[in-house]
Image: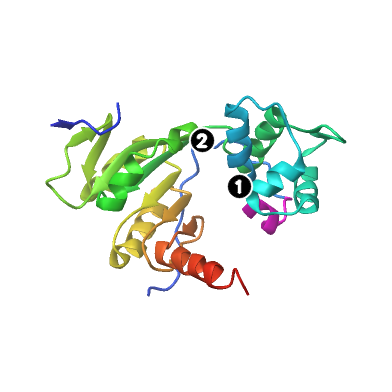
Amino acid sequence: MKEKSERNDPDSVKMEVKAPVDLPSVRSGTIPPATANRLGLYLRELQQFQRSGVKTIKSTSLGNRLGLSDSQIRRDLALFGEFGKRGVGYDVSGLVGALRQALGTDGKWNAILIGLGNLGNALLRYRGFNQQGFVLQAVFDVDQNKVNREIDGIPIYAISELEKRVPSMGVQLAILAVPASEAQNLVNRLALLGVLGVLNFAPIGLSPPTGIQTVDVDLAVELQRLVFAVVNSNR
């Protein structure tokens, strides 16, 4: 059956990881970690300017959007070459290309989503993935009532079929939207399948096997950060 969407505490495990398949070329190894954390923010805002037809942008305008100083932005962007001209600003198109190269999003990344609850459904329908080069190949879920169908052309499989399905998809990334109790086991399984990175929405810190990278996104923690900012904004 095809569904139409609304829009047309384990120890670290060492495992042998399969070689990656068709990885985009990432050129960000010499970028300081603090700068790397800001690159995605710069890219997001610059792409907004680009879609609006803006050709050049000054560091002041970009800083105002992100709450960063002009000097910080100039130091960060100087790592990518001479895209700025004094009195004129940065070439938006050229800088977008350079940032996408540095982040590795100038190519295609195949991904899967595991977990089709409320959060998983929202992530499945997020249009920004394709726009940034992340191609969702399949969804996996434990609920037999949700599997063996498609949503927007994306097939949904039983989680028991993970080892059967993933090797033929050329998957490099996975998104976990599962209960905390299931997350670590899934990361271990994904590592054995050659998956290189996991975006983890489960409210638990993972111990990733050797060869796989994880990024945790805990919405409750982010809300706590927001509350802290609000409470301290007038102090």
| Quarter of the figure with residue 172 | top left
Residue identifier under label 1: 41
Tell whether 101 sits left or right of 191: right
The structure residue drawn at horizontal position 38% and vertical position 37%, both measured from the top left corner, is 136
Residue identifier under label 2: 132
Structural distance between the alpha carbons of marks 1 and 2: 13 Å
Taking the image as drawn, is residue 57 in sight?
yes
The structure residue drawn at horizontal position 55% and vertical position 67%, both measured from the top left corner, is 229
Spot occupied by residue 89 in the image (x, y as percentages of width and height): 79, 35
* Above or below for 140 versus 92: below
Taking the image as drawn, is residue 39 in sight?
no
Locate the C terminus and report the quarter of the image it occupies.
bottom right
Spot occupied by residue 67 in the image (x, y as percentages of width and height): 66, 54
Q: What colour scheme has been applied to the protein in the rendered image?
A: rainbow
Q: Relative to the observer, which residue lies in front, 215 or 229? A: 229
Residue extending furthest front?
A: 234
Magenta stretch mostly in which secondary structure? helix
Callout 1 secondary element:
helix
| Quarter of the figure with residue 32 | bottom right
Residue 148 magenta: no
Range shown magenta? 30-38
Q: Which tag, 1 or 2, sits closer to the chain's start?
A: 1
Spot occupied by residue 98 in the image (x, y as percentages of width and height): 69, 35
Tell whether 49 sits left or right of 117: right
Residue 33 magenta: yes
Please count the marks in the image: 2
Callout 2 secondary element:
loop
* Above or below for 176 versus 235: above
Q: Relative to the observer, which residue lies in front, 46 or 154? A: 46
Q: Relative to the observer, which residue lies in front, 60 or 112? A: 60
| Quarter of the figure with residue 167 | top left
